[in-house]
Amino acid sequence: PAFAVAPVHRRLFGSFVEHMGRCVYTGIYEPDHPSADADGLRGDVLDLITELGPTMVRYPGGNFVSGYRWEDGVGPKEDRPVRRELAWHSTETNQFGLDEFMRWARGLDIEPMMAVNLGTRGIQEALDLHEYANHPGGTALSDLRAANGSPDPHAIRMWCLGNEMDGPWQLGHKTAREYGRLAAETARALRTAEPGLELVACGSSGRSMPTFGAWEAEVLGECYDEVDFVSLHAYYEEHDGDLRSFLAAPADMDRFIEEVVATADHVGARRKSSKRIMLSFDEWNVWYLSRFHREQAENPPSDWPVAPRVIEDRYSVADAVVVGGMLNSLLRHADRVTAASQAQLVNVIAPIMTEPGGRAWRQSIFHPFARTAAAARGRVLRVEPSAPRHDTALYGEVSLLDAAATHDPESGRAALFLVNRSTDTPMEVSADLRGLDGVAAASALTLSDDDVYAANTADDPDRVVLKENKDVRLDGGRLTAVLPPVSWTCVELAGPTPA
Ligand code: AHR
């Protein structure tokens, strides 16, 4: 326990709601659904979100935000304009907007993370949104909020200055210099309005972007003193049946995080600044992105549907194991990654799926997220497992064991999060826990299956679940466990029994 990385920041277990596909409409919001409440929120989805346990949710995009006019989504619903939505080629009805989102988030005790449009818009619109959302009252926009039913300010603390502005696909895409200047000036204006805000500058939309590294250096060169966070986005998928590489994706995520830390600290060093920029990993997940690109190329969108099915990936056991490993990567870097959002929450590359008017169910990736969010408490401990290693085509040599651990000094509770990356061999793990005074075995749950491509569906929603791992023992402070191939395991340890 002396080797603590950092506190387990609750914001690490964030999620993301974008106006994209069916995340909002027929996802969280569906007034005609039999389980809907008076606000039109699906009750079955609210229950699953509560079980999943996200602590913070980023909203309203994503690529969507770069063409969004926030004011379209407030006020009487019958007066809200219907708009063309260019990021995902659909029609936005604006029946759900800022005030509905805030009611939804507060009802679930979720912290909001608000993104402003720095694609087609700029400083004035960001200030207007802030005045509407956070100003106490007595001004045109704060009074409008009150008239729209929210007299109390929404008190949104964390704000993203745009989205993926490095990406040529982004509406209003900018060079690093252009964006860095705009981010700095928007941040300065927002802080003049409210000094305590926490602001996130856009980093790269992926480690493989040609501008990665240079982008962060140049953007932070412009706005280092004005922002608190730089963002990272990463999506992984299995390419051409290369399961070995896919399971090693969290090692790539480790490198990505460490490179962004190095780049940010380099900018800080050149400025002789004692300030440290934190990392907001505000989009991460498994996403079969190359399939999406292929489908788009073969079938370019021609119509403008409302809430179409977009990137509704069906997740397997292997995908869930990678998600578990990505959570480990976030935990391992908890000293610098202090906020993260899995993308997204419902239907769109999501842990929760719904049928319009029908059922809702948990995807395989729901399980490692929910368990880690519940079990990781206190401080992240530094673990240096020694394990066999193997080569991967995409990410080089990696350890077969991916591990993270947390310990709560107050309750004495601890948790180990273990991934066996071997595609064919069980792994026997042994851990010396004598330093964790008197911990007792509590539970060990494993996600694995003979068919690593098994997935949950509406008709078979519990095909992939966590199962008790009976091969975990604690004896004289030594924990032993057997991890099946391609598996994710959470071992929870109770604190010492009071005398
Ligand atoms: O999460 C899906 C999309 O991925 C987001 O809109 C965008 O920011 C990213 O490219």
Image (tube, rainbow, N blue to C red):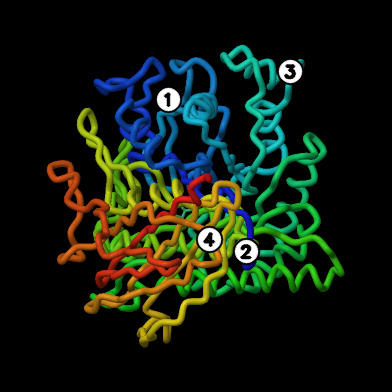
- Looking at the picture, tell me which residue is in the foreground, 401 or 265: 401
Q: Nearer the viewer, mark 2 or mark 3?
A: 2
Image quadrant in which you'd find residue 261: bottom right
Quote the CA–CA distance across marks 4 and 3: 40 Å
Sequence-first tag of 4 and 1: 1
Structural crowding at the residue carrying mark 1, measured as other residues with C-alpha within 10 Å and reported as few (<14), some (14–19) or many (≥20): many
Label 1 within 8 A of ligand 1 by Cβ: no
Sequence-first tag of 1 and 2: 2
The kind of residue tagged 4 is Leu
- Residue 445 versus residue 99 in the image, above or below: below
- Give the residue at mark 1: 95
Q: Residue furthest front?
A: 499
- Give the residue at mark 4: 331
Sequence-first tag of 2 and 4: 2
Badge 3 marks a residue whose secondary structure is loop
Badge 4 marks a residue whose secondary structure is helix
On-image quarter of the N terminus: bottom right
Indicate the position of residue 100 as horizontal and vertical percent values.
49, 25
Residue 474 lies left or right of residue 466; in this view the side is right
Indicate the position of residue 274 as horizontal and vertical percent values.
83, 64
The kind of residue tagged 2 is Ala
Residue drawn at x 66%, y 23% is 153
Sequence-first tag of 4 and 3: 3
Residue 332 lies left or right of residue 246; in this view the side is right
- Give the residue at mark 2: 4
Residue drawn at x 70%, y 63% is 219
Indicate the position of residue 346 as horizontal and vertical percent values.
35, 41
The kind of residue tagged 1 is Gln
Quote the CA–CA distance across marks 1 and 2: 46 Å
- Residue 298 versus residue 207 in the image, above or below: above
